[in-house]
Amino acid sequence: MSVELTAQTSPETAVEPEWEPPMPPTDLIFDDGEPLESNRHRIGMNVLIRSLQQA
């Protein structure tokens, strides 16, 4: 028993245009005027930044 393989030519497939995601909106709200961090958080961040600069 032998298995015969036949090569089938497939018709050309249509090339689909590359999908591009839609552009996000550019008018997003990024600030409401109220700082989210307290003075304690700001001091902690400043200490961290200074320690990294000295390292």
Image (tube, rainbow, N blue to C red):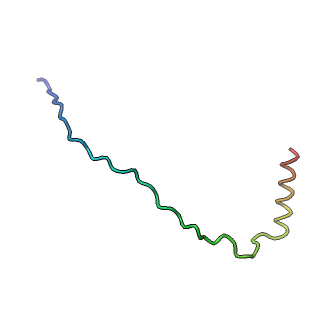
Q: In the image, residue 13 lies at what x, y percent?
A: 26, 44
Residue at x-position 33% and y-position 50%: 16
Report whether 43 appears left or right of 28.
Answer: right
The quarter holding residue 25 reads: bottom right
Quarter holding the N terminus is top left
Residue at image coords 83%, 54%: 49
Count of numbered marks: 0
**Looking at the image, is 1 positioned above or below residue 15?**
above
Query: Picture coordinates of residue 17 (x, y %)?
Result: 36, 51
User: In the rendered view, does 49 fall on the left or right side of 20?
Assistant: right
Q: Is residue 51 above or below residue 29?
A: above
- Is 44 left or right of 7, judged from the image as shown? right
Q: Residue 35, position in %: x, y?
A: 76, 72
Q: Furthest residue to the top? A: 1
Question: In this picture, is 34 found above or below 19?
Answer: below
**Residue drawn at 85 percent across, 69 percent down:** 39
Q: Quadrant of the C terminus?
A: top right
